[in-house]
Amino acid sequence: DISDAEKIANELEMVKGIRRTLESIISTSNDGILVSDTKGKVKYVNERAAEMLANPSEKLLGKPIGSFIKSNKAELVLRDGLPEITEEIINDKRYVISHLPIKQSKNGAVFITGVVNRIYSDDNVLTEQIFAKLLSLKQQVNYYRSELEKYPSNCSFKDIYSRNHEFIEIKNNAHRVSRSSSTVLLTGESGVGKDMFARSIHASSPRAVYPFVKVNCAAIPETLFESELFGYAPGSFTGALKKGKTGYFEQADKGTIFLDEIGDMPLSIQVKILQVLQDKTFMRVGGSSPKMVDVRIIAATNKNLREAIKMGDFREDLFYRLNVIEFHLPPLRERVEDIIPLAKLFIAKYNKILGSGITGLNGKAGEALKNYNWPGNVRELENAIERAANYVWAGEIGCKHLPTQIMSEPRIVDSNDYRSVLIDTDKEIILKTLKKVKGNKSAAARELKISRSAFYDKLNKYGIT
């Protein structure tokens, strides 16, 4: 029998042999290759890279890669786990450099251990066709990065921005209840941020280390609903997987399941959701015994569920089970003070994604945004800024860069918004008057033809110091 020590020695020799083979392949490559660690320092360099960078390999080792490659994107790759491509002139020659993440997995988790920085060869080898393909890859990477940033797997309440007092109070209350396991119902128009609230509640809860599973109830065909939510047992029907299938509820065990657009859930499935809420159990399709599950349910809808109950489209008992804690998120047209600050946040976001240099909005564009009614809410505002960012690239966004409907449809001030408009106007008049009289409160009260006591009451009400 071979001893343990001999086994270890044999395995070590095998590893050394594989390493020598890999080093031989890399060293004979026509492309320059540098490997940097998670701190951005060079851990390996082949001779071709040393030749391109006009430095002996021993001088490159251990040095920050950014000191040799000015267009270095290794830090971005380490952060996002996505490849990056840059173009650079090195020693009067044009090169394209790809930065690829080195990924490893452990216990089901994927993590980045470093970056392979590959410098494509000089102009004799780097044809326009290759360059075009690399640029196409870069555009695809940018697209997927933007999609990931739009829909993060997790976010927190600090990512939800508002200056609106009502919205801030809702956010604070949602943060407070996130510590419990109570069911939450989020209502409001499409695009107001229900998805972000659901993710933030999960991220702030003790369940944050467990899965967050989103289910779009409007996107699942009724015939597949039950098997998607609860899974199915092996051999349940023709075409079923031999091992069966795990449903969304099992995937979310110990975590949170987000039932988005629950108003579109079929009545036949609503009764099964009610059972999960009451008994914490469900049955797989074709299964013979119930399964236990520990999940927190967050539901969301843009429909009026009370009206749906009257129409017979939604179960009343399920509604009261879901409506333990309800947060109604106001539409953007009732949060006028948030429109410009949110637009600026989206400008900064797309500057980062697209590599553009937009400085802001000009006056007329800003007024157009404030006067528009925003039926698509925050999502529509973000889409408008993303569209504008693709046209501008540098300088200010103007009216001509905005979607046509924003310029043609004035904002409708409804009865709910009327009071906030009056308050904003009153506050603006007071501030302008104070500026005019250089802060003299008595003079400001006389200018406005109101008593000093009434004027001081307004200052306290609006928080003007």
Image (cartoon, rainbow, N blue to C red):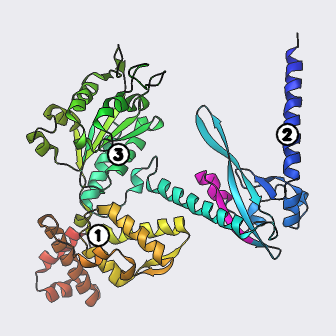
Q: Amino acid at mark 3?
A: Ala
How packed is label 1: few (under 14 Cα within 10 Å), some, or many (20 or more)?
some
Q: Earlier in the sequence, mark 2 or mark 3?
A: 2
Residue 204, image x, y percentages: 40, 43
In this view, 441 is above or below 258:
below
Residue 8 relative to residue 463: left or right: right
Residue that label 3 marks: 198
Whether tag 3 and tag 1 are in contact, CB under 8 A, the answer is no
Q: Amino acid at mark 2?
A: Arg
Q: Quadrant of the C terminus?
A: bottom left
Q: CA distance from mark 3 to mark 1?
A: 24 Å
The quadrant holding residue 289 is: top left
Task: Kindly state the secondary structure of the residue where label 3 is placed.
Answer: helix
Task: Kindly state the secondary structure of the residue where label 2 is placed.
Answer: helix
Q: CA distance from mark 2 to mark 3?
A: 47 Å
Residue that label 1 marks: 337
Q: Earlier in the sequence, mark 3 or mark 1?
A: 3
* Residue 344 visible at all: no
Residue 319 relative to residue 94: left or right: left
Q: Earlier in the sequence, mark 2 or mark 1?
A: 2
Q: Amino acid at mark 1?
A: Glu
Residue 65 lies in the magenta-colored region: no
Residue 214, image x, y percentages: 38, 41
The quadrant holding residue 70 is: bottom right
Q: Magenta segment range?
A: 74-88
| Residue at position x 61%, y 50% in the image | 81
On residue 19, the disc is: 2
Residue 87 lies in the magenta-colored region: yes
In this view, 349 is above or below 357:
above
Residue farthest to the front, as pictured:
238
Disc number lying in front (2 or 3): 2
Disc number lying in front (3 or 1): 3
